[in-house]
Structure formats: C-alpha cells, structure tokens
Amino acid sequence: MAVLLTGSYFAGTTMDNPLPAYAAGATLTLSLFLWNMSRYAKKTAQRKYRERMFQQHMRMTLRNQWH
C-alpha cells in the first residue's frame, strides 16, 4: 500500500496538473488511517469486554467460596 501512496505523490510531481494524483494519495492515506483506527477501537472494546467478564467471574467465584 505504501507503494501506491508513494507512486501517487511521485506521479503528481511529474504531471502538469498534480491535483488528481495528490487527491488519490490523500484519499488512500485517510482511508488507511480510518481503517487502522477502527481496528484499534474494536480490539480495545474486546479487551474491555474480556476484562469485565473476568472481573464478574472473579466476584462470583469469591462470593460462592465463602458460602
């Protein structure tokens, strides 16, 4: 993917009107950034869910241990 980004910027330097190449590079950069952030958010949500489930499990285990 980095090859596409670099290629679009280098193509823009050699074109008479570099705006389409720069726009394509900026669009790819933005889409990669947003995709990476969505993956990170999903992983964070899953990690929080697992932590909550573990805490609930430990509360129930300790509560039932004394009865």
Image (cartoon, helix red, strand yellow):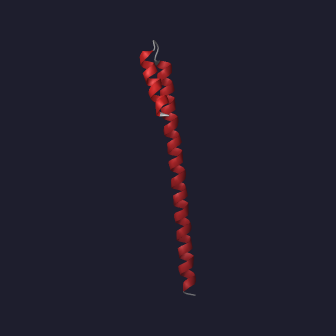
Quick check: 32 above or below 6? below
Residue 39's x, y, as percent?
53, 47
Question: In the image, what residue occupies the spot 51% across and 40% down?
Answer: 34
The quadrant of the image that shows the C terminus is bottom right
In the depicted view, which residue is nearer to us: 46 or 2?
2
State whether residue 42 is above or below residue 22. below
Name the outermost residue toward the bottom: 67
- Count the labels in the image: 0
- 50 left or right of 12? right
Where residue 43 appears, x then y in whole percent?
52, 53
Spot the residue most to the top.
16
Name the residue nearer the viewer: 16 or 49: 16
Q: Position of residue 25 (x, y in %)?
A: 48, 27
Nearest the viewer among 5 and 54 is 5
Q: 29 or 52, which is in the foreground?
A: 29
Residue at 48% over, 39% down: 33
The quarter holding residue 61 reads bottom right
Going 43% across and 16% down the picture, which residue do you hit?
14
